[in-house]
């Protein structure tokens, strides 16, 4: 079972245009209940880009480059099951503080009227 906060390697192909490409690491931001009910996980890709961007959230994971950042701009909902063909594997876990920081940056993508 893939859980919220897991760092996974997942295949983002096929992709088009400006969408995130190739097989890469990603942070799982969806709730465990969402994944269980739908066979989908919502992920934010991880990059080692050195470009300063307000939507990049730095993280620490022994399995990743020291400069790794979660990109909260490109969020994807993907089938993690064998039928989905994404070949998903868990390689680490975000610390709670990191997950909350990613969530806060992710929410900046929306402007819901309350």
Image (tube, helix red, strand yellow):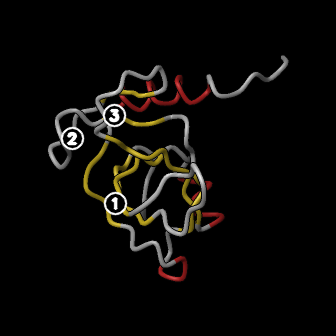
**Which quadrant of the figure has residue 107?**
top right
For the point 17% across and 35% down, the residue is: 66
Q: Which of marks 2 and 3 is nearer the N terminus?
A: 2
Please state, as top left, top right, bottom left or bottom right, where the N terminus lies in the image.
bottom left
Q: Which of marks 3 and 1 is nearer the N terminus?
A: 1
Residue behind mark 2: 61
Which residue is tagged 1? 9
- Whether 45 is drawn above or below 110: the answer is below
Q: Residues within 10 Å of mark 2 (few under 14, many from 20)?
A: some
Drawn side of residue 68 relative to residue 81, left or right: left
The reply to whether discs 1 and 2 touch (Cβ–Cβ < 8 Å) is no
Above or below: residue 39 compared with residue 47:
below
Of 92 and 25, nearer the camera is 25
Q: Position of residue 26 (x, y in %)?
A: 40, 50
The reply to whether the C-beta atoms of the residues labelled 3 and 1 are less than 8 Å apart is: no
Foreground mark, 2 or 3?
Answer: 3
58 left or right of 32 in image: left
Q: SS of the residue at dot 3?
A: strand
Q: Dot 3: few (<14), some (14–19), or many (≥20) neighbours within 10 Å?
A: many
Q: Quadrant of residue 24?
A: bottom left
Q: Mark 3 points at which residue?
A: 69
Marks 3 and 1, how far apart at CA: 14 Å
Residue lying at the far bottom in this picture: please name it.
83
Give the residue displayed 54% in from the left and 76% down from the top.
84
**Upstream in sequence: badge 1 or badge 2:** 1
């Amino acid at each position: 079972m893939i859980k919220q906060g897991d760092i996974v390697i997942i295949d983002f192909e096929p992709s088009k245009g400006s969408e995130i490409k190739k097989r890469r690491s990603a942070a799982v931001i969806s709730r465990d209940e969402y994944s269980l009910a739908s066979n989908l996980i919502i992920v934010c890709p991880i990059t080692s880009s050195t470009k300063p961007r307000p939507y990049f959230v730095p993280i620490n994971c022994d399995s990743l480059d020291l400069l790794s950042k979660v990109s909260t701009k490109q969020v994807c909902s993907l089938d993690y099951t064998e039928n989905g063909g994404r070949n998903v594997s868990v390689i680490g876990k975000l610390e709670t503080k990191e997950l909350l920081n990613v969530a806060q940056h992710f929410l900046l993508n929306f402007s819901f009227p309350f």
